Amino acid sequence: MSTRPRISTRISSISESATLAVDAKAKAMKAAGRPVIGFGAGEPDFPTPGYIVEAAVNAARDPRFHKYTPAGGLPELKQAIAAKTLRDSGYHVEASQVLVTNGGKQAVYEAFATLLDPGDEVLVVAPYWTTYPEAIKLAGGVQVDVVTDETTGYLASVEQLEAARTERTKVLLFVSPSNPTGAVYSPEQTVAIGRWAAEHGLWVVTDEIYEHLVYGGAEFTSIATAVPELGDRVVILNGVAKTYAMTGWRVGWLIGPQDVVKAATNLQSHATSNVSNVSQAAALAAVSGDLSAVAEMRKAFDRRRQTMVRMLNEIPGVLCPEPKGAFYAYPSVKALVGKELRGRRPGSSAELAELILEEAEVAVVPGEAFGTPGYFRLSYALGDDDLVEGVSRLAKLLAEAR
């Protein structure tokens, strides 16, 4: 009888998405009748705008979209994405430099699969989104963490990046606004980091999916536009999910040099072929339209952001920097780890999150999922009443910690 493992080492080394796992557990408890409030999901709580839905309905009736289309995306959508990128980022690309993907996650995976050989190192600022490590690992790359904390607003400095760079470093992953922290690099910080990367001949993979969700005086800056010296060593990842409340439609894209896009398109042609044509038609309507829908969402997110940060900082033992973008707060709960609470003494933020789910029926994602234990990620992409109720439950429970 064979003693070989049933599952390959490559795939068995991948971890489940912690954010999706927390969301699934919260929904299961809710379905069982428990009044769980979930802060885990990273998706707007708004419906997709009607004109986008209507474009999808019309596409579903069009026989043209009942057949295979080019693996790299509908030509008219690629052209519209190029135009949208110029409009929103001031960055000029040709349609041939765009690859339409099955959501932003496929763009992440294909970027690293195309750029990395085994042993190549990628600098990743921690806290980081849960999918980045798994995509780098699958591509044979080596993740090198550059750890930040609340004292700097979760922003990495050029000095930190340089200290982490080695002869094997090939890629810098640059994310602003950030998931999970909401950190946004200023134009000056973005330029400094981009010039450092250019000086050392590094590739920059930049995830810009939260580009339109910035608040107060914060400003989104595309590193590709801000640092022209990077030349053709930039890959931009983006999608319609966050801007247009389209997480379930699964349309993202990758923008880069033509040789990279061609290679990634070859990969996609074997992995999935084209993205759903109906979803592509919806995305075309989204990126071709104005930004009024996201403007309305941004107002609501900004209001909720301020409420959540204020309430979290009123809880003894919790310290929450003000997020400048995306729709997440990332408070430190290090002062509460190890304290007695309801007869238990959680030894990590993961154990504390589990206790909170059981005792307060509130779902948060622990910092372990993002590479920095001692923190929670809370999404404020949920209704105002639920937000206040959820943080109030959290405060009431954590006040018992001794």
Image (cartoon, rainbow, N blue to C red):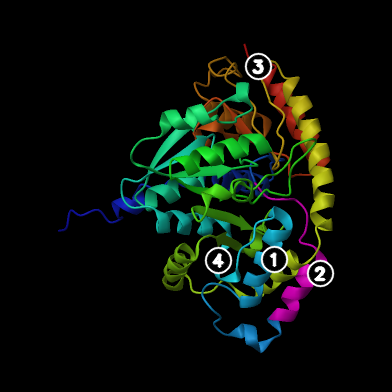
Residue that badge 3 annotates: 317
Residue that badge 2 annotates: 51
Residue lying at 66% horizontally and 50% vertically, measured from the top left: 31
Disc 1 marks a residue whose amino acid type is Ala
Quarter of the image holding residue 361?
Answer: top right
Residue 116 higher or lower than 169, as above or below = below
Q: SS at mark 2?
A: helix
Residue lying at 71% horizontally and 42% vertically, measured from the top left: 327
Q: Is residue 51 magenta?
A: yes
- Mark 3–mark 1 CB contact (< 8 Å): no
Q: CA distance from mark 3 to mark 4?
A: 48 Å
Q: CA distance from mark 2 to mark 1?
A: 20 Å
- Mark 3–mark 4 CB contact (< 8 Å): no
Q: CA distance from mark 4 to mark 1?
A: 12 Å
Residue that badge 4 annotates: 97
Q: Residue 283 got which mark?
A: none
Residue that badge 1 annotates: 83
Q: CA distance from mark 2 to mark 4?
A: 27 Å
Q: Is residue 292 magenta?
A: no
Label 4 vs 1, first from the N-terminus: 1
Q: Which residues are magenta?
A: 42-59
230 and 98: which one is in front?
A: 230
Residue lying at 40% horizontally and 34% vertically, measured from the top left: 165
Q: CA distance from mark 3 to mark 1?
A: 47 Å
Label 2 vs 4, first from the N-terminus: 2
Disc 4 marks a residue whose amino acid type is Gln
